[in-house]
Structure formats: C-alpha cells, structure tokens
Image: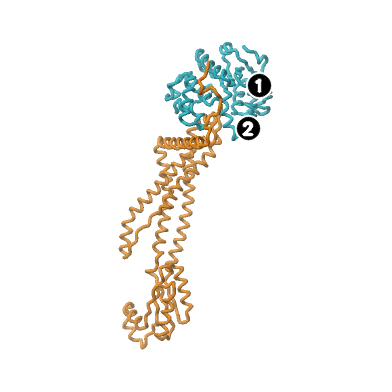
Chain colours: A orange, B cyan
Amino acid sequence: MSLPEELRTARPAGPRTFGGAASTWLERHAQTLVGSLGRLARQPIATALTIAVIGIALALPTALYLVVANARAVTAGLGDTVQLSVYLRLPMTPEVARKVARVIGARDEVSQVVLVSPDEGLVEFRALSGIGEALNALTENPLPWTVKVRPAPSHDSALAVEALAAELRGIPEVELVEADTAWVRRLNALLDTLRQVVLLSAAVLAFGVLAIVGNTIRLDINGRRAEIEVTKLVGGSNAFVRRPFLYSGFWQGLAGGLLAVGLIAAGLAVLDAPIARLAAAYGTSFSLAGLAMREWLAVVGGGAGLGLLGAWLAAGYHLHRIEPRA
Amino acid sequence: MIRFDRVFKRYPNGREALAELSFELATGEMSFLTGHSGAGKSTVLKLIALLERPTRGQVVIHGCNTSTLRRGAIPAFRRQVGVVFQDHRLLDDRPVYDNVALPLAIAGMRRREMDKRVRAALDQVALLGKERMFPLELSAGEQQRVGIARAVITKPPVLIADEPTGNLDPDLALEVMNLFRRFNSVGVTVMVATHDVHLLDRFPVRRIHIEQGRLASNPDVAA
C-alpha cells in the first residue's frame, strides 16, 4: 500500500525558476506549433484548398498594386517627353530674346534651353507641316521667337512642370507658354483612382481571408469537441485550448502569403518578355518592377497576421460555448 | 476539505436535484457517496468538480467557495480536483500516454519530467508498457484505470469518482477500489459515488447516503 515518490507528495507541478519557466513556455509553444502543423498535414486537401483561397485573395490586390506602381514608374520620368514651348511677344529684337532665354536657362528647374529664331522656326514649320507652298505667299514671317525649355530631372513631374509654366508666364516678354501635361494629369488621376481600388479590394479580400480562416477553425473546433471538453474538464484554460487553433490559423495564413508571393513572382516572370518586346517596339527600355523585399515581407506577414486574427476571432467565439458536461 | 452547507440545486429545466444538503469531509478522509439513481449523487460530484454551481448554499472545496470563484479561475480550480468518470472520458484518437499526460501538458510540464510521471502513474494502475496503445485497444477495466491515472497524475488533493466500478466485474472493481484506498492512504481526500453493495461491505469507510437530495439518516456509520 505505498506509492512511489513521483506520486506521493502533492506539490504543484511545473518549473520553479524563471529560466526554467521561460524554456518550458518555449518548449510548450514549440510542441503546439509542430503539433498544429501535423494536424493540418493530416487533412491535406482541405488545408490545400484553404491555403489556395487565401493565396489568391492576397495575390489579387498585390498584383493590382504592382500595376499601379509600374504605371507610376512609367510616368515618373517625364524629362524625355515633356518640354515647354515659351513664345515671346512680337515684336522682339534678337538681343532681348537671347537675354530672356539666358534668364530662363539660369533657373534651377531648367536643365536646358534652346532659342529658336522666327526664321529657324519657319524652316522647321515648312518641313513638318506640309503647307510650305502656302507659306511662300506670306510677305513676312509671322512666327515669334521661341524658347524650348527642358525641365531639370528633379522637376519633371507633371505638377512641377505646371508650376514652372506658371512662373514663366509671369515674365513680361513672354506671350504664351505651352506645356503638354494634360495627358500626364489624366493618367495620374486614373492611377490615383486605381490606388483607391487597390486599397478597397485589399480591405474586402482581407475580410474574406478572415472569414475563410474563421470558418476553417470553426469546423476544426466542432470536430474536436470531445477533446476540448475533456481538456477543460481536467483544468485546461481557454488560452490553452485556443493555442493550437491559433497556430493552425497562423500556418494557413503564412502558407497563403507564401503562395501569393509565388503567384506574383510567376506572373512577373511570364509577363517580362512580352513587356520587353512592347517597350522595344516603342523604342524605350522598360522592365517590370517587382516587389521590394519589404513588400514581399508585408504580403507574407499580412497573410500570417490575418490567419492568426481570423483564428483568434473564431476560437474566442466558439470555444466559450463549449463547456464540459459530466 | 469538502464542505456542503445547505446546498440547494435546481437545474435550468426545473429539476430539483439537491435540497438543503450539508456534510463535511475532512482532509485525507475517504467516503462513499451512496443513494438510488436520481438521488443526487452525480449532482454532488458535479458541484465538487465545479461543472455546476449551487443554486443556493455553499460548496467549499479546499478552502475555496465555488459560488464566488471567477470564471477565469475555474481551470486552476479543476486542476486541484481529480475526477474519474464512469464512462472514462478518454480521447480515443490519442494513445494512452497522451491521455494520461494531458493534465501535465496543461500545467506546462517539461517532457522529461512528464515521462517520469506518466510512467509512475501507469505503474500504479498496472498499465506500464501500454503507453503507445489506444484506449479502444484496451479492456473496460484497463480504460477505467487509464482514467484514474489521468485523474491522479497532477497529485490533486481531492479525488472524486462517479461509479468507477459500474462497468467492471467484481474482481476488477475490487482492484480499482483498492487503488483509491492507496491514494487515500497518502493523504488524498477521496469521494466515490457508488451503489455497488459488495464493495460497500468490504471497505470500512464513511458513507454519505443521500435520498431525494437530502442527507439520509445514519450517514456516519462505517459499514
């Protein structure tokens, strides 16, 4: 009628030092972490489907984001395409015209100015317009002195170009400033709208991910009802019971995030060659920008975070309703 | 250790299970809880394990009043009370080892110490070497002993059992009851609900007999 030492004294179980407590805590979490992976692996099809849905839900807004980012990259450097034409008042002496051109060229926002005399302008116009014969009928040259202005690379955004044009209009000798930035503004407005669409769809799809993970966890909880009851019966706290479900949500979200990143990388790889051909046809070199390391991490981390949150919400709601019965 | 003070219990469906039940069990005492089925035995055990709370009156376990215990403190409370069920309540998809170790895992014990404890507990119930088997591969008596090992593995000061010998033949029942006696002999307060007359006669321990939710006469007779 005697018990071995291990069962004899009724002292509380558990670690006695802080270091011991910390490593026990780590060990316990590591066990649950691996254990929840194993459970997911035992239901490969259900798990794969959940991960696929999460992956697609994360990949869609990411892809849209890339479209916007690349379109912005295309329009960011307008230096090659935009130049301002500054028409000077009539009549104008060559000396004053040269002085105005020098003044404009001295500005910080301007990288280069080319002064075009009325005669040079007429030659160019004749060559380009195709109405050279008609021009011969003119007794005098109606064209003004013109300064062609190329903005500095640091000031070649649509906004800066517009601002520069406004400044130049303030010069007394200037009659008219033409800056073809309307299309850039329209494109930028479109991109702004698209960016809102990215944010909106990301929010909606994030909610979708929460719902998917939450539902998966709910089914999982229902399937393990007996286990949860018994665990609570022998003193398992809600936190203890919840932990494996949280890890399960975390794994699925993480895998979904990785899948999304993979889908995006594959998409970029497929589009790279056609885009290069398209760019070559336009005589420019442009290659698709992918995601920066920070953005890759945001997608994967966002997936894991959403998985964890979805599991936490579902487990908090459903586990409270399972109380042991005798 | 276990004190019932004018406990009245009515279930949500209106059934009145206990009426003015009062008794006290000292630390290290062992008792049988007897009475016809429906007399309120299960309710008494549920109140001790805090699966239910009294409608009126007080249940004090180990100095802890179950009526005023916060919801968040219930898990810690339950770890102080080992419970053995008639239907074992084992997890059939987990091996014996996992079933027995569950309370230790909850307490956050390290694997190495856990191994030692589980082996010691299984040794006590004569199941050493069956750690890797699943509950359904075991006999009814063995399953019941796994349940007992799980109930005692955290060395709880209080051990309660609901008809633990209900499904066992007389020899096994005797064996299981001897097991409870051994835990009682090292200071565990034990309460066993049973209507097994043969057992009652063989063990000279206090009987708490309830009828229609009340303490019946001659409760303190050691049979």
The residue at the point 50 percent across, 12 percent down is B171
* Residue B111 percent coordinates (x, y): 46, 30
Q: Residue B189 appears in which quarter of the rendering?
A: top right
| Residue A121 visible in rendering | yes
Residue type at mark 2: give it: Leu
| Residue A219 visible in rendering | no
Q: Residue under mark 2: which chain is it in?
A: B
Q: Residue B94 appears in which quarter of the rendering?
A: top left
Image quadrant occupied by the C terminus of chain B: top right
Residue picked out by circle 1: B24
The residue at the point 58 percent across, 11 percent down is B201
Residue picked out by circle 2: B69
* Residue B95 percent coordinates (x, y): 44, 26
The residue at the point 43 percent across, 75 percent down is A178
Earlier-in-chain disc, 1 versus 2:
1
Residue placed most toward the observer, B4 or A102: A102
Q: CA distance from mark 1 to mark 2?
A: 20 Å
